[in-house]
Amino acid sequence: MPLIRLAQLFAAAGHTLYGVGGMVRNPLLGLPVTDNDVTSSMTPGEVMAMCRDKGIKYLDIGAAFGMVELHYMGGVFQHTTFRRDTYPTGGGHRPQAVSYSGDINEDAFRRDFTVNAIYKNILTGSITDPTGGMQDLKNRLLRATSKDPAVIMGDDALRIMRMARFASELGFEVERGTLEAARACAAGLADISPERIREELDRILLSDAKYGIPGGPYRGLELLDNLEALDVILPELAKGRGVAQKPQYHKYDVLHHCFHAVDCIEPSLTLRLAALLHDVGKPLCFTVDDRGVGHFYGHPKVSAELAETACRRLRMDKRTAHQVVTLVQWHDRDIPRTEKAIA
């Protein structure tokens, strides 16, 4: 087995190789492994030197942050050295400074959530759990590793998006202190790159397809709304919060109607993005007639314009953005079911 053989090479060099993150968490939940993250006290320079000596292919995917990708016996593994992180004042996605550590406990407490900070010795199978992640797995709970969750969320606001994604994919609840810290730090998402935001949003929208847990997209979107993170990443969509619709046609306000629409669409990213944004223009188009009846006349066109703005801000690729905007613009039209009309 490639991973065992790799661990033996680390052991011969005087280091213990551990699996961490999804490699450990998922099997404990009965889910397939989707991440090959490994860690040890071996520094990036030592890892790369060992690879050169043993003829192992490797890629420097962030050695300054302790990360080296190993290609060994047909397997691909991301190795990160035990480390301590120092973030800039006000937070940011990347640490300002990284110092390597021989202490697995220090490494655990710089990670995001306890369920992602469980370590498995590759050779012996023994578990090291410095932050209490095993109990949180049993309780299906997401909890920040630090006793002060504001440190975890404040250091890197992208962890708020990751939290929503893990809740979506795994069907987990979020511990109250972690939830409140995320809400307090939600404004920090404005400092995260649009590409990172979009990547996590895409994963939330397709979260039910990853492990087959139903209701994932709605769970993640509702969480982002409750945290007021939606106001930062998709302000156009957030404006639909509390905007009522005709009860004979719609059970939910505009925002939650969009959330439910996502859940009703097959797991196609383009279709779910279009479903999420299809009514974002309604709040701007709301009018009341002489009889006191509310209307959203012209909302498909305005929704398409706002959807285009959102796609551009999130740095979406041109093809996907075009398809999403087109679907939004036409979503309220009855298109004839003919090849010519659809083309």
Image (spheres, rainbow, N blue to C red):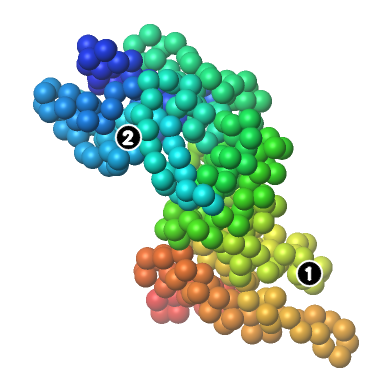
- Residue depicted at x 52% and y 29%: 109
Quadrant hosting residue 264: bottom right
Q: Is 79 left or right of 71, judged from the image as shown?
A: right
Q: Position of residue 297 (x, y in %)?
A: 69, 84
* Image quarter (top left, top right, bottom left or bottom right) of the C terminus: bottom left
Camera-side residue of 318 and 43? 43
Between label 2 and label 1, give the one nearer the viewer.
2
Count every numbered label the image shows and give the total: 2
Q: Position of residue 115 (x, y in %)?
A: 54, 28
Q: Is 112 left or right of 57, judged from the image as shown?
A: right
Q: Which residue is mark 1?
A: 244
Q: Is 135 left or right of 206, judged from the image as shown?
A: right
Report helix, strand or loop for mark 1: loop
Camera-side residue of 174 and 130? 130
Residue extending farthest to the front is 89
- Residue depicted at x 69% and y 82%: 285
Q: Confirm whether residue 74 shows in the render.
A: no
Q: Which residue is mark 2?
A: 66
The amino acid beneath tag 2 is Gly
Relative to 152, is 3 above or below? above
* C-alpha separation, residue under disc 2 versus residue under disc 1: 50 Å
Q: Confirm whether residue 52 shows in the render.
A: yes
C-beta proximity under 8 Å, tags 2 and 1: no
* Image quarter (top left, top right, bottom left or bottom right) of the N terminus: top left
Q: Position of residue 324 (x, y in %)?
A: 47, 69
